[in-house]
């Protein structure tokens, strides 16, 4: 085995690899840029080498710098993670030239799978199902109809030079094929000056399902089931799971065997992923092969119990696979949610800054990975597993230079239903403050009926959230649970307030038992009876709920049990009440006496103030930079300009979406307080 | 007997109606609560004991003798906030527009006298059209009687004013002399002369809201310490403030049970200070992470945001916090921030509230507007306030402590009890660049030499150890253990006794 391994990556994947290396007793080397001096992967590694300035093209992907780090530390192997240099054949060659093992496939495999046309050709030769179509030139409309019939309807008629939906038609029958061909051809000629047209099968209800393969250098290859990755936003995966709720055993086997055949065809040796597109009738077609460890590999590990990183390292060291296809069983269900530093309420705009709070849910070990492997360390065991692969920590900085994904939260349980439920609770327990993040969106997906039914396609987010994400509205049942919880918490908080020193003896305030809980405008009249184990909250219209919790004032996370099922709330203070976040909803909750509630009703409802259409200079200072131009569409939170005051640079951001109408100041201008910098339409 | 009892009951009911149902409805239509409804929200349920319910005015001019409503436009009495006694007066806009008559003033004076005698705060809920013009000078005399009591009560019991409607002319000077003024957004305004007079005299056209609304007084004039959305929220937040305050100047600040480990380690504070010394960070994160349960009651949040003032609790006991805010004007001291912090420090000292000072200050703001505005005397107010304060004083320097501003910010030299510094602290006369350019003036032409000198200077002075060698810093502490160190420091100062020499009063540069 290797005496030392260098991880040519950063963030969560570097940390992930270090964990396995540590388990195997292999010392690790991290590399880091200026922006990552204090990063988690640097803290976790045994050694760390600085390799340059923050931009990746001046540090993490500069082959010479990584090679220097290898020489300097004497590492015998390099794990490239994903992204960066992981599928760079030149890097693999450079390593080979110096006799350093690359924890990945051979150079040839990287090269042949790295090219879309070559890979499709090889796939066809290996009898892997590819999207049927005709790549040659199509003469006329009748030719198009003939070819369409050969491919089988529906078909997609596409301009060779096409893009952005232009010159693209979907045809379901001969007539549409004829018309589609003509219009595509015209459009292509007009738009691109190139009227070449080709036809391929149109995949309806497409799902993205991929097969994990694992091969060694001795000619052995196996597949470790599939991963369903249909929930994507602009080709960026958001939620993955294994197995797929869609595949049957026969399809799985067919896909797996074709994937292994393809891997063997290119002499693959390592972990790799063969991506397929699958239509509503379970026809599957090869898309591409990723010759590296995938981001979403943990879900496969959780249902197979195989540590893929360990397998990769062993294969790289020349060991034969210790598991055969027959050893691979898929047990239970695993779900991964990717936590992105992107603000879902602001068009998923990347959000950078300091993580003032970062408290992931406690990890729990369970399932095959617990049985076979101990890399989750000291996590206690339980019925459902919680695993969080992360590269950040509380007080750390999310920089603008790298991928906005900050964690991969996974759950495993014996059933899909239980895995989803475990994920809901885990998401509710995940505390992240200081930056915008997509936790509420993930919660929304976990409660979406289409996801729950397992009926998603790659168009899920686009179709279900066409106007972006605006938060979750809880149903009546959930609102009542929140109301019951709030009553119990209010009681605790108010009783504490009455215990302040200096009060008049014998004239203490008595905290009542009858309240009106107002949750986002809905009022519930409740009566609370507290006893040793918790409280019983009785709603005036009948229902009773039993609430148990050890919440005390100041706790930002309330873990309650309401009527026997968990309710986890992120709790904040608002004037005279609580801010409570759960299941993707962000609620204002007030608990009041009957009389207080009556009086509160008399208060006028105030509309949120009309944010001015002006950007004013908040301090006397010097404009350093204007980031936008007249006519630019701006997003809420987008940086508009920088003002230097007292030698410090302050970034001014948009308070809402809009269009820049006028810019009144430029770099170098010295402005007084409240001077107008720019105007919006 | 029964008749007499029922007469009492009838009279009470009549008094409780104030100016009658029609005016009550009008008050509600304006989005305002009545004087009694406000008291209900301010005090613990059923704790209000009223005084002078049947007081009526004695004016006989202009037909006033025809209308003599019981209570005369102000409800006064005492009650409890979480079991602690407070006195309260609440002006009733439904009775003569809440205008102040001789008897109305007498009612206020009565409870103020009792508050001082019995050592409990006074909370005034202001909603008044001003002087009762029909009474002429008697009304003016009434104001002055209240002013005199405000002055005498100042520093003896906390006085809180909430402006919940109009407050104009002479009436403004009573709240002005209390410790805290809060306003209700959109329904309250305060000014010495109203928009009409302003127009006549100066030709300025301005609305009441622009001239004296909550926004004006919290952001521009700093007359008000905070503003709330509505009456309900205002009363809830005043209750929250009362929980922080001692009842009088002979009592220690209140302590209440807390659910937060005093030794709680906050590892994230180790990375609070950015690597680039010119990059700002949010000082509020430190305040919230040091405080019990993250609970912070900020005072004057919207004014001079380059300094933060407010109350937290450490181990359950109230502590006043003053902190430079690097996010605004780099946290420098200027006229506004010095005035804001000075008044806060003096309030804390007057009421035995210990002070925590968090320092990251690059100096005083330069410029003609500052000098012409008298930054010398205004800056001196903060210096004076810290120097005279005898309460426990704990200071933590997180980053910059440059020049005179270092001295001002509760330094050891101003009788600081515990002066801690983070390892990132730089205690120096000024930044390295400025210092080098003065010391090595001869090398000014040579950029390399200047850079080398600056690096030397930084090595020598951009740290807390030079100050620590001299004992100006008691200890260099780990950022993550700040809560523990500060909590222990205050715990050790519980019995601090320090007296200034006898004087009639000091002469702070006002």
Image (tube, coloured by chain):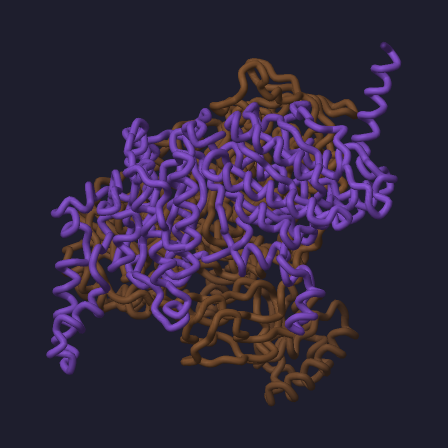
When asked about the image quadrant of residue A353, the answer is bottom left
Q: In front here: A282 or B111? A: B111
Q: Position of residue A635 (x, y in %)?
A: 57, 66
Seen in the picture, residue A371 relative to A180 is either above or below; the reply is above
Residue B276 shown left or right of residue A440 in the figure: left
**Is residue A283 among what the camera can see?**
no
> Which quadrant holds residue B432?
bottom left
What residue lies at 58% left-to-right and 41% top-to-bottom? Answer: A579
Q: Looking at the picture, does residue B183 appear above or below residue A560?
A: below
| Front residue (pair B26, A600) | B26
Picture residue at 61% right of the left edge, 37% below the top: B236
Q: Residue at x 68, y 61 (%)?
A: B194
Image chain in purple: B
Quadrant placement of the C terminus of chain A:
bottom right
Q: In which quarter of the image is the N terminus of chain A?
A: top left
x then y, percent, for residue A653: 51, 65
Left or right, A534 with reference to B387: right
Q: Chain A is drawn in which colour?
A: brown
User: Residue B452: x and y, percent?
Assistant: 13, 71
């Amino acid at each position: 085995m290797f005496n030392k391994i260098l991880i040519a990556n950063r963030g969560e994947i570097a940390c992930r690899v270090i964990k396995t290396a540590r388990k195997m007793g292999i010392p690790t080397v991290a590399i880091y840029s200026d922006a990552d001096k204090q990063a988690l992967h640097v803290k976790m590694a045994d050694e760390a080498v600085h390799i340059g300035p923050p931009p990746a093209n001046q540090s993490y992907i500069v082959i010479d710098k990584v090679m220097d780090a290898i020489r300097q530390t004497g590492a015998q192997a390099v794990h490239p993670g994903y992204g960066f240099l992981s599928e760079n054949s030149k890097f693999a060659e450079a390593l080979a030239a110096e006799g350093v093992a690359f924890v990945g496939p051979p150079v040839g495999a990287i090269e042949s799978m790295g090219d879309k046309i070559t890979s499709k050709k090889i796939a066809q030769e290996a009898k892997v199902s590819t999207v049927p179509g005709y790549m040659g030139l199509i003469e006329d409309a009748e030719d198009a109809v003939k070819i369409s019939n050969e491919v089988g309807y529906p078909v997609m008629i596409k301009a060779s030079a096409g893009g952005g939906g232009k010159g693209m038609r979907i045809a379901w029958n001969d007539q549409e094929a004829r018309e589609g061909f003509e219009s595509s051809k015209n459009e292509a000629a007009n738009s691109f000056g190139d009227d070449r047209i080709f036809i391929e099968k149109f995949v309806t209800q497409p799902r993205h399902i991929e097969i994990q393969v694992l091969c060694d250098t001795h000619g052995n290859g196996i597949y470790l089931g599939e991963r369903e990755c249909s929930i994507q936003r602009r080709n960026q995966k958001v939620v993955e799971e294994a197995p797929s709720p869609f595949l049957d055993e026969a399809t799985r086997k067919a896909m797996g065997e074709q994937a292994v055949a393809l891997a063997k065809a290119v002499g693959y040796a390592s972990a790799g992923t063969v991506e397929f597109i699958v239509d509503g009738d379970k026809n599957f077609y090869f898309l591409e092969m990723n010759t590296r460890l995938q981001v979403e590999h943990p879900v496969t590990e959780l249902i197979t119990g195989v540590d893929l990183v360990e397998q990769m390292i062993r294969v790289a060291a020349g060991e034969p696979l210790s598991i055969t296809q027959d050893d691979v069983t898929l047990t239970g269900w695993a779900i991964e949610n990717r936590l992105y530093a992107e603000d879902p309420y602001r068009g998923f705009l990347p959000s950078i800054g300091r993580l003032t709070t970062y408290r992931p849910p406690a990890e729990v070990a369970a399932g095959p990975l617990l049985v076979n492997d101990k890399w989750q360390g000291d996590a206690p065991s339980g019925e459902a597993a919680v695993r969080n692969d992360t590269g950040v920590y509380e007080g750390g900085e999310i920089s603008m230079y790298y991928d906005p994904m900050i964690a991969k939260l996974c759950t495993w349980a014996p059933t899909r239903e239980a895995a989803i439920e475990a994920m809901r609770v885990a998401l509710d327990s995940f505390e992240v403050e200081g930056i915008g993040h997509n936790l509420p969106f993930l919660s929304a997906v976990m409660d979406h009926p289409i996801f729950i039914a397992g009926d998603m396609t790659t168009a899920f987010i686009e179709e279900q959230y066409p106007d972006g994400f605006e938060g979750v509205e809880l149903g009546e049942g959930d609102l009542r649970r929140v109301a019951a919880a709030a009553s119990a918490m209010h009681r605790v908080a108010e009783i504490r307030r009455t215990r302040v020193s200096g009060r008049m003896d014998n004239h203490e305030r008595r905290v009542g038992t009858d309240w009106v809980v107002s949750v986002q405008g809905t009022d519930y009249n409740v009566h609370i009876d507290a006893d040793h184990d918790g409280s019983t909250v009785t709603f005036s219209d009948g229902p009773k709920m039993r609430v148990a919790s050890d919440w005390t004032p100041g706790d930002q996370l309330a873990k309650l049990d309401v009527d026997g099922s968990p309710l986890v709330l992120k709790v904040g203070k608002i004037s005279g009440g609580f801010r409570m976040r759960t299941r993707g909803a962000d609620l204002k909750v007030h608990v009041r006496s009957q009389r207080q509630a009556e009086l509160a009703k008399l208060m006028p409802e105030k509309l949120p103030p009309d944010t001015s259409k002006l950007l004013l200079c908040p301090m006397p200072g010097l404009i350093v930079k204007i980031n936008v131009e007249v006519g630019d569409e701006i997003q809420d939170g987008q940086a508009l300009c920088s003002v230097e005051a007292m030698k410090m640079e302050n970034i001014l951001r948009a308070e809402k979406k809009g269009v820049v109408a006028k810019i009144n100041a430029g770099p170098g201008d010295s402005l007084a307080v409240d001077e107008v910098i720019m105007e919006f339409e | 007997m029964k008749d007499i009892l029922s007469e009492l009951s009838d009279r009470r009911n009549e008094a409780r109606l104030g100016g009658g149902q029609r005016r009550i409805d009008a008050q509600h239509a304006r989005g305002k609560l009545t004087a009694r409804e406000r008291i209900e929200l301010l005090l613990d349920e059923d704790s209000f004991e009223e005084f002078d319910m049947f007081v009526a005015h004695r004016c006989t001019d202009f037909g006033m003798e025809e209308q003599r409503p019981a209570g005369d436009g102000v409800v006064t009495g005492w009650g409890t906030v979480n079991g602690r006694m407070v006195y309260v007066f609440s002006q009733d806009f439904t009775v003569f527009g809440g205008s102040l008559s001789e008897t109305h003033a007498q009612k206020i004076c009565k409870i103020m006298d009792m508050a001082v005698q019995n050592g409990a705060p006074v909370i005034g809920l202001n909603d008044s059209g001003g002087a009762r013009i029909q009474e002429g000078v008697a009304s003016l005399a009434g104001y002055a009687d209240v002013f005199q009591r405000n002055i005498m009560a100042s520093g003896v019991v906390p006085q809180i004013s909430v402006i919940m409607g109009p407050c104009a002319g002479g009436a403004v000077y009573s709240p002005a002399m209390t410790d805290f003024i809060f306003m209700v957004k959109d329904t309250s305004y305060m000014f010495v002369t109203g928009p009409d007079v302003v127009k006549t005299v100066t030709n300025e056209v301005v609305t009441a809201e622009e001239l004296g609304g909550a926004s004006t007084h919290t952001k521009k004039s700093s007359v008000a310490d905070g503003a709330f959305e509505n009456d309900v929220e205002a009363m809830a937040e005043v209750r929250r403030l009362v929980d922080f305050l001692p009842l009088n100047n002979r009592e220690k600040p209140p302590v209440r049970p807390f659910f937060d480990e005093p030794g709680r380690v906050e590892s994230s504070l180790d990375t609070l200070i950015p690597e680039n010394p010119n990059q700002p960070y949010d000082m509020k994160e430190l305040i919230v992470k040091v405080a019990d349960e993250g609970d912070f009651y900020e005072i004057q949040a919207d004014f001079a945001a380059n300094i933060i003032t407010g109350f937290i609790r450490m181990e359950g006991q109230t502590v006043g916090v003053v902190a430079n805010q690097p996010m605004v004007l780099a946290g420098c001291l200027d006229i506004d921030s010095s005035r804001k912090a000075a008044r806060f420090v003096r309030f804390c000292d007057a009421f035995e509230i210990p002070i925590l000072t968090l320092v990251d200050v690059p100096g005083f703001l330069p410029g003609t507007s500052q000098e012409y505005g008298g930054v010398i005397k205004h800056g001196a107010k903060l210096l004076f306030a810290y120097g005279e304060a005898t309460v426990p004083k704990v200071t933590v320097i997180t980053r910059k402590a440059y020049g005179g501003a270092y001295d001002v910010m509760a330094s050891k030299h101003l009788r600081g009890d515990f002066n801690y510094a983070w390892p990132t602290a730089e205690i120096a006369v000024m930044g390295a660049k400025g210092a080098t350019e003065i010391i090595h003036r001869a090398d000014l032409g040579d950029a390399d030499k200047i850079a080398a000198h600056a690096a030397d200077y930084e090595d020598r002075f951009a740290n807390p150890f030079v100050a620590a060698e001299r004992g100006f810093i008691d200890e260099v502490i780990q950022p993550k253990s700040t809560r523990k160190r500060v909590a222990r420091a205050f715990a050790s100062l519980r019995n601090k006794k320090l007296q200034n020499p006898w004087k009639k009063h000091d002469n702070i540069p006002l």
